[in-house]
Amino acid sequence: ETEDEWSDEEGLDDVQSIDPAEECPIIPFIELKGHTDDVWSLKVFDNGHKLLSASGDNTLKVWDLTTGKVLHTLKGHTSFVFGCDVYNDIAISGGDDRTVRVWDLSTGSIVSVLKGHSRLV
């Protein structure tokens, strides 16, 4: 079918296209370099100003999205870090080492290590 054949049938004659360059805000591109293996999970927080990344290099990184700089490298997992989340100033991560780790994002230090999983978290 051509566009003319289906647009009349579906009532799409009134659809207007927009120019994304005119209608969408400019979002700057920023490349974050620092992990030495694949990144498995990302969490944006602090009203879009910070990012937490979890990687196969056994670390998490806290990034300042306004500068692109690493604020903290969270070390403690002994294998791949697959997941992460943030609540206020606390980060939680889970990995192939079968632990869940709780982190203080203001200092980058481990608050707690939760063990007991029989497989990756």
Image (cartoon, rainbow, N blue to C red):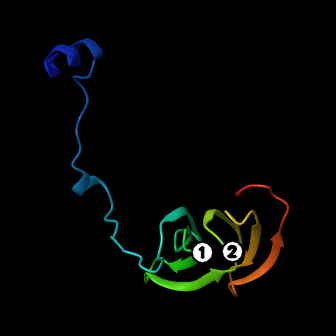
Point 60% across, 74% down: residue: 58
Image x and y of residue 93, in percent? 69, 66
Q: Quadrant of residue 71?
A: bottom right
Label at residue 60: 1
Separation of residues labelled 1 and 2 (CA atoms): 9 Å
105 in relation to 83, above or below: below
Type of residue at label 2? Answer: His
Could you tell me if the residues under marks 1 and 2 are in contact, i.e. CB atoms within 8 Å? yes
Q: Dividing the image into 4 quarters, which one contains the N terminus?
A: top left
Point 16% across, 14% down: residue: 5
Secondary element at tag 1: strand
60 and 15: which one is in front?
60
Q: Dividing the image into 4 quarters, which one contains the C terminus?
A: bottom right
Label at residue 77: 2
72 in relation to 120, above or below: below
119 in relation to 110, above or below: above
Type of residue at label 1? Answer: Leu
Secondary element at tag 2: loop
Point 57% across, 78% down: residue: 62
On screen, residue 39 versus residue 77, left or right, reads left
